[in-house]
Every structure is written in structure tokens, then in C-alpha cells.
């Protein structure tokens, strides 16, 4: 309440300048009041534009299967293998008080390590002050959240703070303090603050690489190559070359914690799926339907180009773009969809109090620039439930339908507030409805 009052009384530019200090004071206060609940805990922070949740979950699964009692806090939820709680708010790294309360819960469950998905907002706002990061992991840094950070340089610098925290933690329990994606153009920027205490991973050139990658719709098999000559096979059950990269980041964590190759391979192979990430929806239909949280231009490029290569028939994609978030990405999303997909269906994501029709037109502009034509292979259907029905209704046998942007989220935000949402459930209902209608038509005929 106090923060909202201050925000309403002073210029926006001044508020943004002093906001981190207000968050810092709040973080210090709650850490003191709650007794620094993470003190002595070993924390792995995972940051990046895309892949944070999947990479965090891979690390969490790997460590638990290696016998290390590990907790997880991500966009999806938080908990341990014995007790999981869903996250019902649109926030990854929670405000300090809520985050510390969750850490206290996990500590009471006896965890040794915590994998904490850590956002640029939380780092820039000092919300994670006092969290004893032992190890920092970077997935990638691409166009996102410029509505808040202003420039890409500010956004990247905010993410690097995680690595600075890990280096500064003199009580850290591992020699390796950073795991960096060498395929990302910002790799050197992150490495600058690490000294010699980091590992790089890459599909081709790093301390940890992958070779002989064989991908399928259900996952990938590949060989891990570690500098020094060690090689061993790994199988993951998450499709897409980007998930091979995410797995290599987890391998880096395993190396930093002195896990052996069997512990790493078994742990990565134990993860069967991540909620809202490349989830196949199967109701017995003769076309594929996949739900994914992808919502950035880079994630669109990766998932759409990857699915284009694997799709047997046409590729149909449905998505929107959030209101009160980075406007500049909307046209980029549309352009990527227009480039790779045969049919593009534009809809709402979380309009909030922003004109949904305007958002759709901004997205459509990018798709049109990539060659799509409205009411031919580009369709604007604002209601997301109707858009899912429409996209699934367009599918023929062998086609692939991608539903992007909401993934695991349990609500959708509109001008009148939050509404319950279930992307997987909506997709299943639309498939069943289509199959029922088709069966009725056949019977009638």
C-alpha cells in the first residue's frame, strides 16, 4: 500500500530510480525479521530469458536422484519430491517476504540444496538480497522485459548480478561458481566477473558439449563430451535441441557438485516432463497438439524452427502477447510465426487493461511482413478459448498445433481481473469436441 502511494505521488522516472533502494530496505527488514532463513543453505540460482524453469527442474531432478535432498522454486511452483505446491501467481521470483516464507517451509523439510529460478526483476530490485548463492547458471539472454529495464544492456547487467552474488559468497561450498552458455553472445560478459571459477557449455564449443544428437518428438539422445576426454551417453525426454542445451547446463551443475557420469545421466533421464513446457496433449486424435510457455522472440524462433523440421504435416501456431509488457516483441513474435508456421492464429494472452485488438494488430503486422494474409493463413480470434478451438479445428491428419504463451499458468488476466485458466484442459476439451462432432458427422452420414 505504501509503495503504491509513493508511486502515485512522485514522477515515474524518480520512482524507478529509487525503487531498488526501497526493495533493498524491504529485503533487509524481512531477512532480519524472519531470521535469514536461507543462512547456511546451498543455493543454485538459474537465470536467463528462456529455459530457466526447465533447466532448474532438470537440476532439481538430477540432484534428488543422486541422493541430495533438494528443493525447487520456479515459475511453476515450489517444493520437494515429497511435497509440491503450485504457483498460482504470474511471478517467478516472489516478493521477499513470500520467498523467505517458502524457503522456511523447504528448510523445515530438510533440504540440503535449493534450486531458485531467479529473474532480472528480482536481481535489479534487490529482492534476493541475503540469499547465499553458491552457484549461478545462465541459460541465455535475448530480447525481453525492456519495458522495465529500458535497454538490453540494463537487462543483461541485471542478470549478471546473480553471478556477482555467487562470487561474493565466501561461504560458498563449491569451487565452480558459474555455469555459462558459450553459445550465447553475452557469454563473455558473464565470464568477466567469474575469474577462473566457471564452466561453459555449448552444443559445439565449450567445456561441456553434445555430439551425435538424435532428436525425436519425445526427446533426444546425445553424447556428453567433457573437456579432458570423458564421454558418456544421455537420454532426455523433452523434445527440441534447446532442451539439449538446457540439459548441458544441468550437466555443468553436476560437474560442479562432483557427481559422476552415471548420476548425471540417470538424473537427467528421470525427468519425464515439465508442466507447460512442450506438453503433448493426446486424446487419440490423428494430429499433434503441444502446449508450451514460449513467449519471447528467441523462444519462438527455437521452438517453431525445431517443430518445423520435425512436423510431418502443416504447422499451426496460436499465441498472443501480454498487455503492460514489452511491446517491441509483439511484431517479432508475429514475424517468427509467419516465417515458420503454415497457419497463424493470434489471440489474447494476458491483455490486462490494454486494448486486446491493438495487441493482436501489432502481432499481425509482423506476420503480414513475413508473408501471411489475414483470413487466409493468418486469423485473429481474441477469445483464447475460441482461438484454441479454431486452431485445433484447422488441423488435418498429421498436422502439428502449437499453443504458446500460457503453458502452466492457472489464470488469465483481463481488464476485469484474473480468471481461472487451464491451457491443457482447454486443448483437451477442444480436441474432444472436434472428435465428437466428427463422429456424429460420420454416424449421420
Image: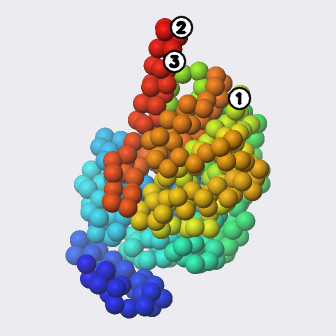
Q: Nearer the viewer, mark 2 or mark 3?
A: 2
**Residue at mark 2 to residue at mark 3: CA–CA distance:** 11 Å
Check the image and name the residue furthest to the left.
33
N-term mark: 2 or 1: 1
**Which residue occupies the foreground of this view, 172 or 99?**
99
Residue found 36% across the figure and 64% down from its top:
94
Residue found 51% across the figure and 14% down from its top:
441
Residue 185 in view in this figure: yes
Which residue was labeled with disc 2?
445
Is the residue marked by circle 3 packed among few (<14), some (14-19), or many (20+) residues within 10 Å?
few
- Residue 391, picture quadrant: top right
- Please report contact status of discs 2 and 3: CB closer than 8 Å, yes or no: no
**Left or right: 425, with 326 as reference point:** left
**Residue at mark 2 to residue at mark 1: CA–CA distance:** 27 Å
**Left or right: 210, with 152 as reference point:** right
Q: Secondary structure at mark 2?
A: loop
- Residue 164, picture quadrant: bottom right
Q: Secondary structure at mark 3?
A: helix
Which residue was labeled with disc 3?
438
* Number of the label disc, if any, that sits on residue 383: none
**Left or right: 355, with 130 as reference point:** right
**Residue at mark 3 to residue at mark 1: CA–CA distance:** 20 Å
From what the image shows, is residue 404 above or below residue 330?
above
Residue 175 locus on image (x, y percent):
55, 64
- Please report contact status of discs 3 and 1: CB closer than 8 Å, yes or no: no
- Please report contact status of discs 2 and 1: CB closer than 8 Å, yes or no: no
Q: Nearer the viewer, mark 2 or mark 1?
A: 2
**Which residue occupies the foreground of this view, 135 or 240?**
240
From what the image shows, is residue 428 above or below residue 19?
above
Which residue was labeled with disc 1?
313
Amino acid at each position: 500500500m505504501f509503495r503504491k502511494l509513493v508511486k502515485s505521488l512522485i514522477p515515474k522516472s524518480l520512482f524507478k530510480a529509487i525503487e531498488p533502494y526501497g526493495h533493498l530496505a524491504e529485503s533487509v527488514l524481512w531477512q532480519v525479521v524472519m531470521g535469514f532463513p536461507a543462512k547456511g543453505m546451498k543455493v543454485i540460482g538459474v537465470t536467463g530469458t528462456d529455459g530457466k524453469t526447465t533447466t532448474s527442474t532438470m537440476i532439481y531432478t538430477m540432484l534428488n536422484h543422486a541422493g541430495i535432498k533438494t528443493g525447487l522454486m520456479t515459475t511453476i511452483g515450489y517444493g520437494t519430491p515429497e511435497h509440491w505446491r503450485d504457483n498460482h501467481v504470474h511471478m517467478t521470483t516472489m516478493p521477499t517476504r513470500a520467498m523467505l516464507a517458502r524457503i522456511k517451509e523447504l528448510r523445515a523439510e530438510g533440504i540440503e540444496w535449493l534450486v531458485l529460478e531467479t529473474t532480472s526483476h528480482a536481481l535489479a530490485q534487490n529482492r534476493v538480497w541475503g540469499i547465499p548463492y553458491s552457484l549461478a547458471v545462465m541459460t541465455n539472454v535475448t530480447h525481453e522485459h525492456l519495458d522495465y529495464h529500458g535497454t538490453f544492456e540494463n537487462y543483461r547487467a541485471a542478470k549478471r548480478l546473480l553471478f556477482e552474488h555467487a562470487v561474493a559468497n565466501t561461504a560458498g561450498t563449491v569451487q565452480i561458481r558459474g555455469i555459462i552458455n558459450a553459445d550465447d553472445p553475452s557469454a563473455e560478459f558473464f565470464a568477466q566477473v567469474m575469474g577462473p571459477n566457471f564452466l561453459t557449455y555449448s552444443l559445439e564449443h565449450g567445456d561441456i558439449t553434445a555430439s551425435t544428437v538424435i532428436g525425436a518428438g519425445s526427446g533426444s539422445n546425445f553424447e556428453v563430451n567433457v573437456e579432458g576426454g570423458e564421454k558418456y551417453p544421455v537420454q532426455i525426454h523433452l523434445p527440441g535441441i534447446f532442451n539439449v542445451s538446457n540439459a548441458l547446463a544441468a550437466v555443468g551443475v553436476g560437474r560442479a557438485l562432483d557427481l559422476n557420469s552415471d548420476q548425471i545421466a540417470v538424473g537427467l533421464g528421470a525427468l519425464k516432463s515439465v508442466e507447460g513446457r512442450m506438453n503433448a496433449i493426446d486424446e487419440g486424435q490423428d494430429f499433434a497438439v503441444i502446449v508450451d510457455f514460449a513467449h519471447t522472440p528467441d523462444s519462438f524462433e527455437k521452438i517453431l524452427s525445431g517443430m518445423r523440421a520435425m512436423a510431418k504435416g502443416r504447422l499451426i501456431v496460436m499465441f498472443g502477447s501480454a498487455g503492460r509488457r514489452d511491446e517491441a516483441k509483439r511484431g517479432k513474435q508475429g514475424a517468427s510465426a509467419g516465417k515458420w508456421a503454415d497457419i497463424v492464429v493470434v489471440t489474447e494472452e494476458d491483455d490486462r487493461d490494454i486494448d486486446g485488438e491493438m495487441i493482436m494488430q501489432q502481432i499481425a503486422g509482423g506476420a503480414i511482413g513475413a508473408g501471411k494474409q489475414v483470413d487466409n493463413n493468418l486469423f485473429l480470434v481474441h477469445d483464447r478459448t475460441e482461438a484454441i478451438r479454431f486452431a485445433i479445428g484447422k488441423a488435418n491428419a498429421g498436422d502439428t498445433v502449437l499453443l504458446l504463451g500460457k503453458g502452466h499458468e492457472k489464470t488469465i488476466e483481463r481488464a476485469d481481473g484474473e480468471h481461472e485458466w487451464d491451457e491443457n484442459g482447454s486443448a483437451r476439451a477442444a480436441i474432444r469436441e472436434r472428435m465428437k462432432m466428427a463422429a456424429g458427422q460420420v454416424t449421420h452420414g
